[in-house]
Amino acid sequence: MLTKDQLQAYWRQNLTYIVVLLSIWFTVSYLFGIILADVLDRIKIFGYPLGFWFACQGAEITFVILIAVYVKLMNNLDRRFGVQEE
């Protein structure tokens, strides 16, 4: 069982992970895919505008990668605090 201080440290670190990862997702999906799409469209990847790529595929691919990163970070955090699943 975690002490109150350990529990607060655990959730503080968890919230830090969430804020950082959601900020990355926001940047890729909203800023790159919508707001900055016209600017990014000047760059071509395999003949497609970069802004188009972010809007169509980049946000989804980034989201899946961020899920995997979050799982890895949380598994490490759980082990550090001794609350991992058996």
Image (cartoon, rainbow, N blue to C red):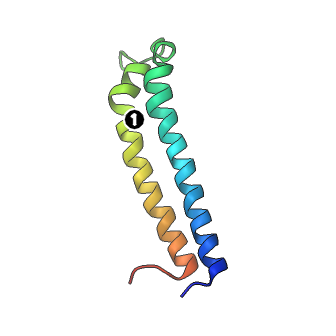
Q: Looking at the image, which is closer to me, 29 or 6?
A: 6
Residue 45 appears in the rendering: no
Q: Looking at the image, which is closer to me, 26 or 46?
A: 26
Task: Assign the C terminus to one quadrant of the image.
Answer: bottom left
Amino acid beneath label 1 = Ala
Q: Looking at the image, which is closer to me, 45 or 18?
A: 18
Residue 9: percent from the left, percent from the top? 64, 71
Q: Residue at x 47, y 13 (%)?
A: 38
From the image, tell me which residue sits under label 1: 59
Q: Which residue is drawn at 52% across and 70% down?
A: 76
For the view shown, which residue lies furthest in the front direction? 4
* Residue 41 located left or right of residue 10: left
Vertical side of 24 occupied by 78: above or below: below
Vertical side of 43 occupied by 72: above or below: below
Residue 27: percent from the left, percent from the top? 52, 34
Q: Looking at the image, which is closer to me, 63 or 13?
A: 13
- Mark 1 residue element: helix
Residue 81 appears in the rendering: yes
